[in-house]
Image: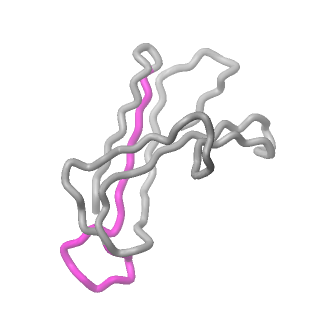
Amino acid sequence: MEFDCSKPITSSCGKTQVEFTEPGICHGFALWIDWVMDSENSLVVSTGPEKRYWKQGVKLLAEPVAVRTNESRSTGECRSAVIQASFDPSSGDLDVRHAFS
């Protein structure tokens, strides 16, 4: 999702597919925000892995999910997840949904 903070913020949504790089158990997803401050993407403020005064978001799963990589031959485990997010500026709500495949 992208927001132009020089204009009134409108509803926004985004979708991405995440491929798992290691087999294991998925307990949730970490979320963060990058603020791109110029049109060349040379000045970026991030809430990513470095420690800052703001926090990352975490979407925990109700039940852990077994995952595998595309190279794995085992069956019955998920290889990827589709993450969808939508933002409602009138309430400030960020809705994050997921589906495994």
Residue 49 as seen in the image, left or right of residue 58: right
Q: Is residue 41 left or right of residue 99?
A: right
What span is in magenta? 68-88
Number of marks in the image?
Answer: 0
Q: Percent x, y for residue 15?
A: 44, 45
- Measured along the vertical axis of the image, is residue 101 above or below residue 45? below
Q: Is residue 37 above or below residue 5?
A: below
Q: How is the image coloured?
A: one colour
- In the rendered image, residue 77, in percent from the top left (x then y), is placed at 24, 71
In the displayed structure, 66 sits above or below 81; it is below
- Residue furthest to the bottom: 73
The C terminus lies in which quarter of the figure?
bottom left
Residue at 41% over, 38% down: 85
Q: Residue at x 43, y 59 (%)?
A: 18
Place residue 3 in its image quadrant.
top right
**Picture residue at 23% right of the left edge, 58% below the top:** 64
**Vertical arrangement, residue 18 with respect to residue 11, above or below:** below
How far from the left and from the top, in percent, is residue 87? Answer: 44, 28
Residue under the point 35% across and 58% down = 81
Q: Is residue 77 magenta?
A: yes
- Dividing the picture into quadrants, the one containing residue 22 is bottom left
Q: Quadrant of residue 86?
A: top left
Q: Is residue 75 magenta?
A: yes
The x, y position of residue 45, in whole percent, is 69, 40
Q: Looking at the picture, tell me which residue is in the foreground, 47 or 6.
A: 47
